[in-house]
């Protein structure tokens, strides 16, 4: 894997469903994802996330625009597609295309901490079924993994365990494209975030940029935070009465606080913006500049 090699390239992707009554799922979506990166697709239900993953995986073949992938994709749908009447090991063998199933399956069961592989899948918890979905994708020989809402319906303990599995897959150099509306689980994993609404990308940000975004509320809002002469921060927008700023490189939080106080501002609230709050601000129409 060479730095900068593209695993996924999507240009001007459009998708509609229906013949007479058209339902638009994706509108002019473009993104390029480097090998070994973890990218989060963020949006409410109906934002187009699942459609995008199905197109990248090859499940949906008819669309407008271009989609190119560097290798086979392993797709984990939101709803498990394992056979409930089969044992976990038998499920994996059904899809397996290698030559040493016993060794490969034992390795993957140990890596993902899938216990009781001799049980029928109908007796698995949702978390164990999710792990089995990921195991199947890995055993397919895929270097690109597409995970559709992997944390949906999981309790906090299992969600944390799944986050650790995703971190390990990233360390191994796999490319991960993950759709979610539960951002806390990916806050320290994903390299880039694409915020979707009604089939369109509202905004794309990398993890470094997001880590430098803060929300400020002043007790004396008449004081302007005009940044035309500032080099320490940039005003991004306004959301729910709070000013969103991005701290520029080379500056820290204390530098900004001291500068605002020096300019006469009395700070009521100053905090790093969580991914969830940032997503809400974007989806609810915060004015970004």
Image (cartoon, rainbow, N blue to C red):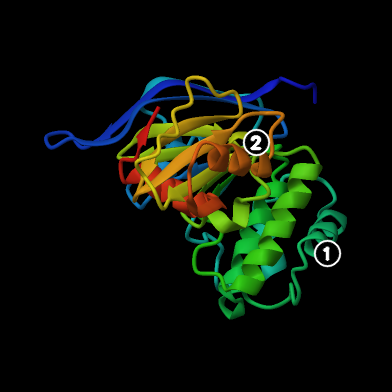
Residue furthest out toward the right: 103
Q: Earlier in the sequence, mark 2 or mark 1?
A: 1
Q: Give residue 66's quadrant in the image.
A: top left
Tell me if 140 is positioned left or right of 273 in this view.
right
Mark 2 vs 1: CB contact within 8 A? no
Of 5 and 262, which appears nearest the observer? Answer: 262
Give the position of the C terminus as an image quadrant. top left
Position of residue 218 relative to residue 245, above or below, is below
Q: Looking at the image, which residue is at 54% across and 44% down?
A: 214
- Mark 1 secondary-structure assignment: helix
Q: Looking at the image, which residue is at 68% across and 68% down?
A: 88
Residue 44 drawn at (x, y percent): 37, 51
Give the position of the N terminus as an image quadrant. top right
Q: Give the number of the mark in front: 2 or 1.
A: 2
Count of picture labels? 2
Of 15 and 253, which appears nearest the observer? Answer: 253
Position of residue 131 relative to residue 41, above or below, is below
Please give the residue where the numbered disc 2 appears in the rendered image: 208
Give the spatial CA distance, label 2 vs label 1. 33 Å
User: Is residue 175 at all visible to an observer of this figure?
Assistant: yes
Please give the residue where the numbered disc 1 appears in the rendered image: 110
């Amino acid at each position: 894997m060479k730095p900068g090699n593209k695993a996924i390239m999507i240009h001007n992707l459009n998708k509609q469903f229906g013949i007479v009554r058209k339902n638009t799922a994706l509108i002019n979506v473009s993104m390029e994802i480097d090998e070994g990166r973890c990218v989060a697709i963020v949006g409410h239900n109906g934002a187009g996330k699942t459609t995008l993953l199905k197109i990248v995986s090859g499940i949906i073949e008819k669309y407008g625009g271009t989609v190119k992938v560097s290798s086979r994709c392993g797709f984990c749908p939101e709803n498990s597609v394992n056979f409930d009447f089969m044992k976990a090991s038998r499920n994996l063998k059904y899809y397996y295309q290698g030559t040493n199933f016993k060794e490969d399956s034992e390795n993957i069961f140990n890596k993902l901490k899938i216990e009781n592989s001799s049980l029928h899948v109908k007796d698995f918890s949702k978390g164990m079924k999710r792990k089995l979905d990921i195991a199947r994708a890995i055993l397919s020989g895929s270097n690109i993994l597409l995970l559709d809402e992997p944390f949906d319906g999981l309790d906090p303990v299992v969600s944390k365990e799944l986050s650790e599995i995703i971190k390990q897959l990233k360390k191994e150099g796999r490319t991960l494209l993950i759709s979610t509306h539960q951002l806390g689980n990916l806050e320290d994993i994903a390299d880039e975030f694409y915020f979707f609404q009604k089939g369109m990308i509202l905004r794309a940000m990398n993890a470094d940029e997001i880590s430098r975004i803060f929300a400020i509320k002043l007790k004396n809002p008449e004081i302007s935070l005009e940044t035309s002469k500032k080099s320490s921060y940039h005003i991004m927008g306004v959301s729910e009465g709070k000013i969103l700023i991005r701290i520029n490189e080379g500056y820290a939080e204390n530098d900004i606080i001291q500068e605002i106080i020096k300019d006469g501002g009395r700070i009521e609230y100053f905090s790093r913006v969580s991914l969830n709050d940032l997503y809400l601000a974007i989806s609810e129409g915060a004015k970004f500049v």
